[in-house]
Image: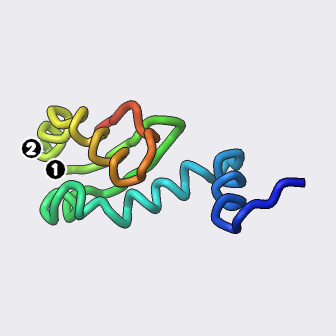
Amino acid sequence: MAQYSLGEALNEFLNKSRIKGDIQALRIDDVWEEIMGKTVARYTDKLQIIGDRLIIATTVAPLKNELIYQREKIIQRVNEALGQKVIREVIVK
């Protein structure tokens, strides 16, 4: 039987688990202000990951439009912050 470090075992468990999206959403929540700035973070109501989609909820119409235009940049920044390609699509609600 192969030997794993605790970190490797946890990563393997998370990769096969259904809670992976929830854990990644929490990680994104933690770095969202760093990625997007204080103003965007303040007016973002909810972040959610479903599959490979990041769903961003906000009630501020100008911010919603700006986030729509910045989708590709958001994907790039979030994936860099997580250290792996997790997000392939951004949906703004």
Kind of residue indicated by mark 2: Pro
Q: In the rendered image, which residue does mark 1 sit on?
A: 60
Does 25 appear above or below 73? Answer: below
Kindly check if marks 1 and 2 are in contact, taking CB atoms under 8 A apart as contact.
yes
| Pick the front one: 54 or 77 | 77
Q: Is residue 41 left or right of residue 86?
A: left
The quarter of the picture where the C terminus appears is: top left
Kind of residue indicated by mark 1: Val
The quarter of the picture where the N terminus appears is: bottom right
Residue 65 x, y percent position in the rendering: 14, 37
Query: Which quadrant would residue 76 be assigned to in this image?
Result: top left
Q: Secondary structure at mark 1?
A: loop
Q: Is residue 65 left or right of residue 46?
A: left
Residue 78 x, y percent position in the rendering: 33, 48
Distance (Cα) linking label 1 and label 2: 6 Å
| Pick the front one: 63 or 76 | 76
Q: Secondary structure at mark 2?
A: helix
| Pick the front one: 7 or 43 | 7
The residue furthest right is: 1
Local crowd size for mark 2, using a 10 Å CA cut-off: few (<14), some (14–19), many (≥20) = few
Does 56 appear above or below 24? Answer: above
Residue 62 tag number: 2
Residue 77 x, y percent position in the rendering: 27, 46
What residue sits 64% from the left and 65% below the top?
7
